[in-house]
Image: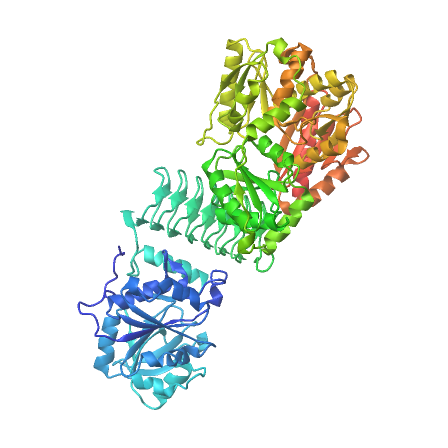
Amino acid sequence: MSSPTEPGAAPTEDPAPAMKAVVMAGGEGTRLRPMTANQPKPLLPVVNKPIMEHVLRLLRRHGFSETVVTVQFLATLIRNYFGDGEELGMELNYVAEEVPLGTAGSVKNAEEYLRGEPFMVISGDALTDIDLTDMVRFHRESGAKVTIALKRVPNPLEFGIIIVDEQGRIQRFLEKPTWGQVFSDTVNTGIYIMEPEVLERVAENEVVDWSGDVFPELLAEGEPLYGYVADGYWEDVGTHESYLSAQADVLSGKVDVEIDGFEVSPGVWVGEGAEVARSAVLKGPLYVGDYAKIEAGAELREYTVVGSNAVVRAEAFAHRTVLHDNVFIGRGANLRGTVVGKNTDIMSAVRVEEGAVVGEDCVIESEAYVHNDVKVYPFKTIEAGAVVNSNVVWESRGQRSLFGPRGVSGLINVEITPELAVRLANAYATTLKKGAIVTTSRDVSRGARTLKRAIISALTAAAIEVRDLEVAALPVARFLTAKTEVAGGIAVRTSPGDPESVDIVFLDGDGADLSPGAQRKLDRVFSRAEYRRAFPGEIGELSFPSRNVETYAHDLLRSVDTSGVAEAELKVVVDCAGGTSSLILPSLLGRMGVDVLTVNNRLDEDSPTDTDVKKTRDLDRLGELVAGSNADFGVRFDPVAERLSIVDENGSPIDNDRALLAVLDLVAAERGRGTVALPVTTTRVAETVADSHGLRVSWTPTATHELTKAVRAGGEDIVFAGDGRGGFVVPEFGPTSDGIAAFVRLLGLVARSRRSVGQIDRRIPQAHLLRRSVPTPWAVKGSVMRSVVEAAGERELDTTDGVRVVEPDGSWALVLPDTAEAVTHLWAEGPDSDIAHRLLDEWAAVVERAEG
């Protein structure tokens, strides 16, 4: 479809007789960088079509079927896009310049295609709908040797200005004058019709310019040079402002070009396969490209162009903004008067201001702020919360480590794509010896399945043997990785709490998360793309080991004390949450003599992770079943069986902090000696519980691998570890969180203690531990922590992780910057809630003052 045509701009009824055209497509477009940093200016999209495609379609409409394209900068990209011109109904030939030859020298280079007949020269990077047929008529009727298309413009300083007489014959012209030299507002558009003998005046393989060399010479000799003053539209798309203006002019119908798609309401164009939610706000004129997705609550305002396959999330806002193909705009992002290059991700709550340009393949992380007129060049990462007020050209501003607290995490098919998974697996394989064995596993989701297949292909291609455990609980994958003495493993799962994100978890040879040192090694290989490739005879084998569940269950029951369970005749309710624990429990519980009611005992592809709503609903239902069936207690596994939630005999859920204390009390009472490993964020009531039974607490940093490290280092002296978030370590079985092993251990402890879970919980003192998070830009995190140390004065400091300030009465506050997000976390504990609140407010104020 096409937009309305301006009067006088439409082609005439009869197309011009056959005449060849030369499209000049060699420009770099340096003023348009970073948009043109990795693509030639003629390929810049205007309403989702390259500028040059609009030019070629104009030529075809006016009867120009044979066209020569002169190319230089990134010539292959232009050839690959347009090919031989068949799709446009044209015949395209390409002539490349080894070195720049000027506007005339470039056409001279194509002389073999132009001999013996008049030809047209037109720029491939200017948007126009000038009536070329009428210009050809004017050229022939005037008997011109050269006809130049002219256009009246308000500001002629960037162009060549020309004066013509009443018949249109050129009297004078001057290239790019100053205001003091301006004698006309009629400028040279760079569109010419020439007789073939004009090329004889151009020297071969020399830099020659039409306006600076050839035309003045012809004018001086009295040759007939004519100017055709065009009524149609013409815009030299040479600046970011003119690029945005060109989009607006197409959408407003000021220029007659084709717009692919359907005009669903006046001025609102939607491409094929695009999904626009009913509650999305669209105020035209605007364009939504093919297969783009606009979510409910998003708002697109006037003169916005959304590229093909782009995604605009809920509550995002865009006005006078151009998004190229495959762009992702996160929830609540705000963009005004900006351009975003292809394959770039703008994450949640980002703000990009007027005149800013973000190049292709960039990531602007959550809550970043990009100031007016800032240019972010391709392949850059702007850190979460960063304020960017200068161009980002060479450095990758604030790019974080590849690894976060749960491995490599991100949105499926936005941040974590199959292509990225292949590169990650290549990097991991390169850190291992050829022929090494690696396990792979996944949760029930389709996204994890897709990514795991990509990972397996990359591993085997890099001479790694793969043992695929298929769908497996994460503790089972960890166990089998350690048990079978392989080099490591890769597990793919949906991110906890976010069904649209995924975690790629890399395991070492003991089934634990990679150490920071191993992560840095993998990160270096990945960032340098120094991947190993196997020769054909070295490509690894893929195998599917059998009896995985039976092996895990056998070793678990052999390692964990379950004595007394059968005699206690326990009755429990277990919620598998539609996850991978449902693959293990039948064979495990059948051997233990426990009366078990299981719910959600299936693999649920549609709900592969926990959300707060889902977890709360399931725990309420679990509580009803426990109370209604007079069960001793209930447990709910997370979907990958790594964590455990507990419901007491009355059907009341026990929060994670209290559950940690209850299990600690059971373990400590039975063992009577040893050490427990707990993160520094745990309530100091844990110390009271441990001391009362003769146990010692070893405080660790909060990162998951630190708990594993402490368990490994402590050896047999470590009798228990937990993270306070539902993760329990059973040291006699393994050094990592294992919800299934924790459940089996809990059965034995409850059976032998002959006390209910509720009784144990009620005898433990109440803790008054509060938590708060304060947004903190990355740039000031260091100064925030310095301010905390200064504010502590003479008070006792503990720097195990972050800064913990201990008051004389034992109350304490912990300030800990987040390693993956632009926030600072605070904990405060006191003998009562009032003191804890006062401490939390005091240190939150310190953090906020330091930010200011």
Instruction: Say which of 629 and 269 sits in front.
Output: 629
In the image, farthest residue toward the front: 537
The quarter of the picture where residue 551 lies is: top right
Horizontal and vertical percent for residue 73? 46, 69
Is 759 on the left or on the right of 311, as rendered? right
Residue at (23%, 63%) from the top-left corner?
7
Is the residue 514 above or below the residue 387 in the image?
Answer: above
Is 459 on the left or on the right of 519, as rendered? left
The quarter of the picture where residue 708 lies is: top right
Instruction: Classify the position of the C terminus by image quarter.
Output: top right
In the image, farthest residue toward the left: 13
Residue at (49%, 17%) from the top-left corner?
621
Residue 129 visible in the current orientation = no
Horizontal and vertical percent for residue 656? 62, 23
Instruction: Say which of 650 and 600 sits in front.
Output: 600
Instruction: Say which of 146 and 180 sits in front.
Output: 146
Residue 17 visible in the current orientation = yes
Is 131 on the left or on the right of 569, as rendered? left
Horizontal and vertical percent for residue 321? 42, 52
Residue at (39%, 43%) from the top-left corner?
294
Number of numbered labels in the structure image: 0
In the image, farthest residue toward the right: 794
Instruction: Classify the position of the N terminus by image quarter.
Output: bottom left
The quarter of the picture where residue 135 lies is: bottom left
